Image (spheres, rainbow, N blue to C red):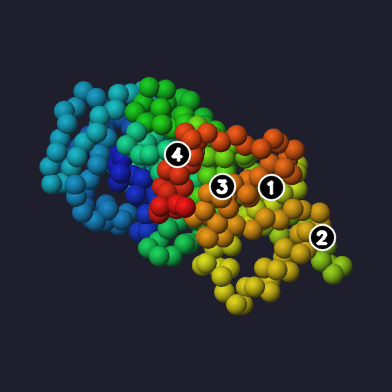
Amino acid sequence: MDYVICDKDALRFWLGPQGVTRTFTPNALCSRVDNMGASSKLPWERLQRLGFTEGPLHLLVPEQHAHRFSSSVITHLWRPPYPEETFVKLAPNIYILSPVASLVRVASSLSFAKTMQYAYQLVGTYRIDGSEIRNRPALTTPDDIRRYVDAASGVRGTKRMRLVKDYLVAGAASPEEANVVILLVAPCRMGGYGLPLPVLNKPIKLTVNGKSEERRPDALWEADRIILEYLGDRYHNRPDRYGPDAARKTHLQEAGYTVIDVTKHQTASKQELDSIVGVIRARMNLPPLKQSEEFARRNEQLRSELFERRSA
């Protein structure tokens, strides 16, 4: 029997803090599992080595199976055929939904903001390990997410994923960076500011004191030469960073870039964020953003969810 880990357990595996490998080789991806099933006697010794320490474990079974709920197993039904590259083989007879398929399956129970956050984490270069942020290769790409969502028409969760798939940008290096970008690029109907998509952490070459140096701006609108940097407390709000951060900004400005800093204080204030967006839109020769009462309400809700607090 082949066990397919799905839903909350699958997403937790890809994004969670357990000390196991979450990258995978292309040949681990597959589009079918022939002997999919569930049993009350799971191979816990092998599962524990993969980071699954206790039940109940969420397992996928074909639709002709009956639902099972026990202390060890909760089954979920999904009628084949499955979109290509839905499964990843972790070990003999143990499979898991791919990162994209895992998010699609749970998206229907998530808010727009939370779905965006999970999607940005899948395409970003970080994972959250308790209170630490650790680097790791991206698990998928925005194009792969869009391709899978289009192929999974009718699958639970695709309706929510269609709302987010066109606003994903790869390369965020921290959840704070991701949250700011989500707020700026999400459509106005969802409470975002509807800005064009930037590129994140893309290297650019500068000449500093006659030497070639590389910078990786948090967010860059290349055509308009606009850079946005998130100055988070974790890395920037320290005396040893004030000088280097100021010099970095000066060098970028000397190279012809407009550099806009965003801080934790500004993310708490709609007025501050409105001002930042106004500067960006002006540099892009876009008209001022028209705001209605409905937009203000949705913007408040989106900011509150992204930054997990009430906003001013």
Q: Nearer the viewer, residue 247 or 1?
A: 247
Give the residue at mark 4. 297
What mark, if any, has residue 279 been given in the picture?
Answer: 1
Q: Alpha-carbon distance for marks 3 and 1?
A: 15 Å
Per the image, label 4 sits on a secondary structure element best described as: helix
- Amino acid type, mark 2: Glu
Per the image, label 3 sits on a secondary structure element best described as: helix
Give the residue at mark 2. 254
Q: Position of residue 276 (x, y in %)?
A: 63, 50
Q: Is residue 10 above or below residue 86?
A: below
Comparing labels 3 and 4, the label whose residue is closer to the camera? 4
Q: Alpha-carbon distance for marks 4 and 1?
A: 22 Å
Comparing labels 3 and 1, the label whose residue is closer to the camera? 1
Q: Are marks 3 and 4 in contact (CB under 8 Å)?
A: no
Q: Alpha-carbon distance for marks 4 and 2?
A: 39 Å
Q: Nearer the viewer, residue 177 or 309?
A: 309
Q: Crowding at label 2, few (<14), some or many (≥20) Cα neighbours within 10 Å?
A: few
Q: Crowding at label 4, few (<14), some or many (≥20) Cα neighbours within 10 Å?
A: few
Per the image, label 1 sits on a secondary structure element best described as: helix
Q: Are marks 3 and 2 in contact (CB under 8 Å)?
A: no
Give the residue at mark 3. 181
